[in-house]
């Protein structure tokens, strides 16, 4: 599976290693992606996702998974995160 954050869309970037003699060789900058379980308060269950460290800080800053997903743009979210967001919206409308 790709090294991509399911919540922020952060992925692999490319760049150069630059030596002291200014020789340039291509390299990859990998995001710090971890497999974590995030709890949804509205649904009362947890979800396993691959999230970057920056994405995890953003979730905590916004007050949890539910608030983060409701504010997030769909274009940045993975398919599974969009499904969770849809379920959270349905649960919010039902209550």
Image: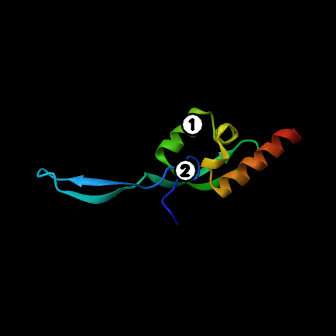
Residue occupying the point 62% across, 55% down: 78
Secondary structure under the numbered disc 2 in the rendered image: loop
Label 1 vs 2, first from the N-terminus: 2
Residue occupying the point 50% across, 63% down: 2
How packed is label 2: few (under 14 Cα within 10 Å), some, or many (20 or more)?
some
How packed is label 1: few (under 14 Cα within 10 Å), some, or many (20 or more)?
few
Q: Which residue is mark 2?
A: 9
Q: How is the image coloured?
A: rainbow
Q: Nearer the viewer, residue 55 or 16?
A: 16
- Which quadrant of the view contains residue 83? bottom right
> Taking the image as drawn, is residue 7 in sight?
yes
Q: CA distance from mark 1 to mark 2?
A: 17 Å
Q: Which residue is mark 1?
A: 60
Numbered circles on residues, count: 2
Task: Report the quarter where the C terminus lies.
Answer: top right
Residue occupying the point 53% across, 52% down: 5
Asked whether, in this view, residue 56 is left or right of residue 30, the answer is right
Asked whether, in this view, residue 40 is left or right of residue 35, the answer is right
Q: Position of residue 70 (x, y in %)?
A: 70, 39
Secondary structure under the numbered disc 1 in the rendered image: helix
Q: Position of residue 94 (x, y in %)?
A: 88, 41
- Which quadrant of the view contains residue 42? top right
Asked whether, in this view, residue 25 is left or right of residue 79, the answer is left
Residue occupying the point 43% across, 56% down: 12
Asked whether, in this view, residue 38 is left or right of residue 53, the answer is right
> Taking the image as drawn, is residue 43 in sight?
no
Q: Position of residue 88 (x, y in %)?
A: 76, 45
């Amino acid at each position: 599976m790709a090294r991509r954050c399911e919540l922020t869309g952060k992925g692999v970037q490319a760049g150069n290693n630059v030596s002291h003699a200014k020789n340039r060789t291509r390299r990859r900058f990998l995001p710090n992606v971890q497999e974590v379980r995030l709890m949804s308060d509205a649904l009362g269950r947890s979800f396993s996702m691959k999230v970057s460290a920056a994405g995890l800080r953003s979730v905590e800053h916004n007050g949890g998974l539910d608030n983060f997903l409701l504010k997030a743009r769909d274009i940045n979210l993975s398919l599974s995160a969009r499904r969770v967001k849809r379920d959270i919206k349905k649960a919010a409308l039902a209550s």
